[in-house]
Image: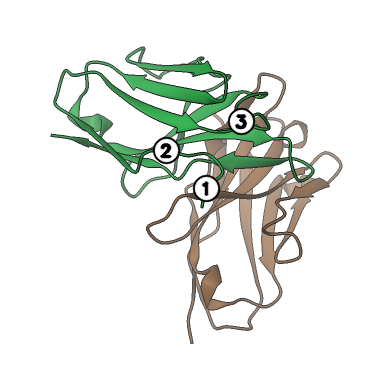
Chain colours: A green, B brown
Protein backbone atom coordinates (compact mmCIF):
# COMPACT_ATOMS: atom_id res chain seq x y z
CA UNK A 1 0.00 0.00 0.00
CA UNK A 2 1.68 3.20 -1.19
CA UNK A 3 1.53 6.38 0.89
CA UNK A 4 0.67 8.40 -2.22
CA UNK A 5 -2.32 7.20 -4.25
CA UNK A 6 -2.32 7.10 -8.05
CA UNK A 7 -4.74 5.44 -10.45
CA UNK A 8 -3.18 2.20 -11.68
CA UNK A 9 -3.87 2.99 -15.32
CA UNK A 10 -4.68 5.79 -17.73
CA UNK A 11 -5.05 5.95 -21.48
CA UNK A 12 -5.48 8.32 -24.37
CA UNK A 13 -5.20 8.59 -28.11
CA UNK A 14 -2.42 10.45 -29.93
CA UNK A 15 -2.84 14.22 -29.67
CA UNK A 16 -5.11 14.02 -26.63
CA UNK A 17 -4.48 15.55 -23.22
CA UNK A 18 -4.36 13.20 -20.25
CA UNK A 19 -3.95 13.84 -16.57
CA UNK A 20 -2.67 11.57 -13.83
CA UNK A 21 -3.58 12.31 -10.24
CA UNK A 22 -1.60 11.79 -7.05
CA UNK A 23 -3.31 12.02 -3.68
CA UNK A 24 -1.51 12.35 -0.37
CA UNK A 25 -1.89 14.00 3.01
CA UNK A 26 -0.83 17.01 5.04
CA UNK A 27 2.45 15.35 6.01
CA UNK A 28 3.62 14.88 2.43
CA UNK A 29 2.02 16.66 -0.54
CA UNK A 30 0.28 19.13 1.74
CA UNK A 31 3.56 20.53 3.05
CA UNK A 32 6.29 19.54 0.60
CA UNK A 33 7.17 19.62 -3.10
CA UNK A 34 5.86 16.99 -5.50
CA UNK A 35 8.01 15.22 -8.06
CA UNK A 36 7.08 13.17 -11.10
CA UNK A 37 9.10 10.43 -12.79
CA UNK A 38 8.66 8.65 -16.10
CA UNK A 39 9.78 5.06 -16.46
CA UNK A 40 9.85 3.74 -20.00
CA UNK A 41 9.69 -0.07 -20.33
CA UNK A 42 12.93 -1.73 -19.25
CA UNK A 43 14.67 1.50 -18.29
CA UNK A 44 15.50 3.49 -15.17
CA UNK A 45 13.10 6.22 -14.04
CA UNK A 46 13.68 9.76 -15.31
CA UNK A 47 12.87 13.02 -13.51
CA UNK A 48 10.00 14.69 -15.33
CA UNK A 49 8.78 17.40 -12.93
CA UNK A 50 10.39 18.83 -9.80
CA UNK A 51 9.23 21.39 -7.22
CA UNK A 52 5.58 20.75 -8.20
CA UNK A 53 5.71 22.27 -11.68
CA UNK A 54 9.30 22.74 -12.88
CA UNK A 55 10.67 20.87 -15.87
CA UNK A 56 14.33 19.83 -16.07
CA UNK A 57 16.05 20.90 -19.25
CA UNK A 58 15.22 18.56 -22.09
CA UNK A 59 11.72 17.69 -20.87
CA UNK A 60 9.14 18.88 -23.42
CA UNK A 61 6.64 21.51 -22.34
CA UNK A 62 3.88 19.02 -23.18
CA UNK A 63 4.46 17.79 -19.64
CA UNK A 64 3.20 19.97 -16.79
CA UNK A 65 2.66 19.52 -13.07
CA UNK A 66 0.36 21.17 -10.59
CA UNK A 67 -0.47 20.89 -6.92
CA UNK A 68 -3.44 21.89 -4.81
CA UNK A 69 -3.73 21.11 -1.13
CA UNK A 70 -2.90 17.45 -0.61
CA UNK A 71 -3.22 16.44 -4.26
CA UNK A 72 -1.11 16.86 -7.36
CA UNK A 73 -1.53 16.19 -11.06
CA UNK A 74 0.64 15.50 -14.06
CA UNK A 75 -0.77 16.61 -17.40
CA UNK A 76 0.49 15.43 -20.76
CA UNK A 77 -0.78 17.31 -23.79
CA UNK A 78 -0.36 16.34 -27.44
CA UNK A 79 -0.02 12.70 -26.41
CA UNK A 80 2.53 10.68 -28.40
CA UNK A 81 3.15 6.96 -28.66
CA UNK A 82 6.53 7.39 -26.98
CA UNK A 83 4.78 8.69 -23.85
CA UNK A 84 3.59 5.17 -23.11
CA UNK A 85 5.28 4.46 -19.79
CA UNK A 86 4.80 4.18 -16.05
CA UNK A 87 4.52 7.48 -14.17
CA UNK A 88 5.29 7.90 -10.47
CA UNK A 89 4.72 10.81 -8.12
CA UNK A 90 6.89 11.33 -5.05
CA UNK A 91 7.17 13.67 -2.09
CA UNK A 92 8.97 14.02 1.21
CA UNK A 93 6.85 12.83 4.11
CA UNK A 94 7.40 14.49 7.48
CA UNK A 95 6.13 11.52 9.50
CA UNK A 96 8.28 8.72 10.96
CA UNK A 97 11.35 11.00 11.22
CA UNK A 98 11.04 11.86 7.55
CA UNK A 99 11.12 9.70 4.46
CA UNK A 100 10.69 9.89 0.70
CA UNK A 101 7.43 8.31 -0.45
CA UNK A 102 6.27 7.30 -3.91
CA UNK A 103 2.90 6.70 -5.47
CA UNK A 104 2.13 3.20 -6.71
CA UNK A 105 2.58 4.26 -10.31
CA UNK A 106 0.24 4.80 -13.24
CA UNK A 107 0.65 2.86 -16.45
CA UNK A 108 -0.17 5.14 -19.37
CA UNK A 109 -1.31 3.45 -22.56
CA UNK A 110 -1.43 5.33 -25.84
CA UNK A 111 -4.23 3.75 -27.85
CA UNK B 1 28.02 14.81 -18.17
CA UNK B 2 26.60 13.49 -14.91
CA UNK B 3 26.61 9.70 -14.81
CA UNK B 4 25.83 7.07 -12.20
CA UNK B 5 27.08 3.64 -13.22
CA UNK B 6 25.99 0.64 -11.19
CA UNK B 7 27.58 -2.76 -10.82
CA UNK B 8 26.27 -5.73 -12.78
CA UNK B 9 23.49 -8.19 -12.13
CA UNK B 10 23.90 -10.64 -9.26
CA UNK B 11 22.50 -14.11 -8.61
CA UNK B 12 22.78 -15.20 -4.99
CA UNK B 13 21.47 -17.85 -2.63
CA UNK B 14 19.43 -17.11 0.50
CA UNK B 15 21.70 -16.33 3.43
CA UNK B 16 24.56 -15.02 1.30
CA UNK B 17 25.94 -11.51 1.60
CA UNK B 18 26.09 -8.94 -1.17
CA UNK B 19 27.41 -5.45 -1.82
CA UNK B 20 26.42 -3.54 -4.97
CA UNK B 21 27.92 -0.27 -6.10
CA UNK B 22 27.08 3.02 -7.78
CA UNK B 23 29.93 5.12 -9.20
CA UNK B 24 29.33 8.80 -9.85
CA UNK B 25 31.13 10.93 -12.40
CA UNK B 26 30.78 14.30 -14.09
CA UNK B 27 30.01 16.21 -10.89
CA UNK B 28 31.31 16.77 -7.36
CA UNK B 29 30.42 13.41 -5.77
CA UNK B 30 30.88 14.68 -2.23
CA UNK B 31 28.42 17.56 -2.64
CA UNK B 32 25.22 15.66 -3.46
CA UNK B 33 23.23 13.03 -1.62
CA UNK B 34 22.81 9.61 -3.23
CA UNK B 35 19.64 7.62 -2.69
CA UNK B 36 18.80 3.96 -3.21
CA UNK B 37 15.45 2.84 -4.59
CA UNK B 38 14.04 -0.68 -4.82
CA UNK B 39 11.71 -1.94 -7.52
CA UNK B 40 10.41 -5.46 -7.00
CA UNK B 41 9.34 -7.39 -10.11
CA UNK B 42 6.29 -5.76 -11.67
CA UNK B 43 5.95 -3.32 -8.77
CA UNK B 44 6.51 0.34 -7.98
CA UNK B 45 9.38 2.36 -6.55
CA UNK B 46 10.35 2.24 -2.87
CA UNK B 47 12.82 4.57 -1.20
CA UNK B 48 15.41 2.70 0.88
CA UNK B 49 17.74 5.40 2.16
CA UNK B 50 20.20 8.14 1.33
CA UNK B 51 23.82 8.99 2.03
CA UNK B 52 25.85 12.17 1.83
CA UNK B 53 29.26 11.03 0.60
CA UNK B 54 30.93 14.20 1.92
CA UNK B 55 30.61 13.02 5.52
CA UNK B 56 28.79 9.66 5.16
CA UNK B 57 25.69 10.99 6.91
CA UNK B 58 23.09 8.27 6.25
CA UNK B 59 19.32 8.12 6.62
CA UNK B 60 17.22 5.00 6.21
CA UNK B 61 13.59 4.40 5.41
CA UNK B 62 11.91 2.80 8.44
CA UNK B 63 11.00 -0.10 6.13
CA UNK B 64 14.66 -0.86 5.40
CA UNK B 65 16.39 0.17 8.63
CA UNK B 66 18.38 -2.80 9.90
CA UNK B 67 17.83 -4.75 6.67
CA UNK B 68 20.51 -3.10 4.55
CA UNK B 69 23.60 -0.93 4.98
CA UNK B 70 24.35 2.10 2.85
CA UNK B 71 27.92 3.38 2.65
CA UNK B 72 30.20 5.42 0.43
CA UNK B 73 33.87 5.74 -0.44
CA UNK B 74 34.40 9.33 -1.53
CA UNK B 75 37.96 8.62 -2.65
CA UNK B 76 36.56 6.61 -5.56
CA UNK B 77 33.21 8.41 -5.89
CA UNK B 78 31.25 5.26 -5.16
CA UNK B 79 28.21 4.52 -3.03
CA UNK B 80 27.26 1.05 -1.87
CA UNK B 81 24.22 -0.94 -0.80
CA UNK B 82 24.84 -4.15 1.08
CA UNK B 83 23.08 -7.07 2.68
CA UNK B 84 24.54 -9.43 5.27
CA UNK B 85 22.01 -12.21 4.73
CA UNK B 86 19.88 -12.14 1.60
CA UNK B 87 16.31 -13.42 1.44
CA UNK B 88 14.29 -14.45 -1.59
CA UNK B 89 12.16 -11.36 -1.01
CA UNK B 90 15.22 -9.17 -1.75
CA UNK B 91 14.90 -10.15 -5.41
CA UNK B 92 14.45 -6.83 -7.17
CA UNK B 93 16.00 -4.14 -9.32
CA UNK B 94 17.94 -1.61 -7.26
CA UNK B 95 18.60 1.92 -8.48
CA UNK B 96 20.86 4.63 -7.16
CA UNK B 97 19.93 8.24 -7.87
CA UNK B 98 21.35 11.67 -7.08
CA UNK B 99 19.63 14.36 -5.02
CA UNK B 100 20.34 18.03 -5.69
CA UNK B 101 18.87 19.56 -2.55
CA UNK B 102 20.20 23.01 -3.40
CA UNK B 103 17.94 23.17 -6.46
CA UNK B 104 15.36 20.83 -4.95
CA UNK B 105 15.88 18.40 -7.81
CA UNK B 106 15.31 15.08 -6.16
CA UNK B 107 16.56 11.96 -7.93
CA UNK B 108 17.58 14.03 -10.95
CA UNK B 109 20.03 11.45 -12.30
CA UNK B 110 19.66 7.68 -12.03
CA UNK B 111 21.93 4.70 -12.42
CA UNK B 112 20.96 2.00 -14.90
CA UNK B 113 19.91 -0.36 -12.12
CA UNK B 114 21.33 -3.56 -10.65
CA UNK B 115 19.17 -6.66 -10.80
CA UNK B 116 19.55 -8.85 -7.73
CA UNK B 117 18.12 -12.36 -7.89
CA UNK B 118 18.03 -14.44 -4.73
CA UNK B 119 17.12 -18.06 -5.29
CA UNK B 120 18.06 -21.42 -3.89
Residue placed most toward the observer, B40 or A73: A73
| CA distance separating discs 1 and 3 | 19 Å
Most foreground residue, B6 or A19: A19
The 10 Å Cα crowd at callout 1, few under 14, some 14 to 19, many 20 or more, is some
Are the residues under badges 3 and 2 in a single subunit? no
Q: Mark 1 touching mark 2, by CB under 8 A?
A: yes
Q: Which residue is mark 2?
A: A6
Q: Chain of mark 1?
A: A
Q: Which element carries disc 3, helix, strand or loop? A: strand
In the picture, the disc for residue B50 is: none
Q: Residue at (18%, 30%) from the top-left corner?
A: A81
Between residue A5 and residue B27, name the one nearer to us: A5
Mark 1–mark 2 distance (CA, rounded to whole Å): 9 Å
Residue, x 83% and y 46% (percent of image)? B56
Quadrant in the rendering for residue A18: top left
- Residue B90 position, x and y percent, is 55, 69
Residue hosting label 3: B106
Q: Secondary structure at mark 1?
A: loop
Residue at 64% x, 32% y is A28
Q: Nearer the viewer, mark 3 or mark 2?
A: 2
Residue A24: give x, y in percent of width and height: 55, 33
Q: Is residue B77 above or below residue A78?
A: below
Q: Residues at badges 1 and 3 in contact (C-beta under 8 Å)?
A: no
Q: Between marks 3 and 2, how big is the CA–CA gap?
A: 19 Å
Question: Mark 1 — residue?
Answer: A2
Amino acid sequence: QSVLTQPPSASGTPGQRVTISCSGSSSNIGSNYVYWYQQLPGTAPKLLIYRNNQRPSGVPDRFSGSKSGTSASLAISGLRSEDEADYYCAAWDDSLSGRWVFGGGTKLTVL
Amino acid sequence: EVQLVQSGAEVKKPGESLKISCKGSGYSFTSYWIGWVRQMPGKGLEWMGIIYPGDSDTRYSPSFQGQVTISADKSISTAYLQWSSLKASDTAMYYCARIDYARQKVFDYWGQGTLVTVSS
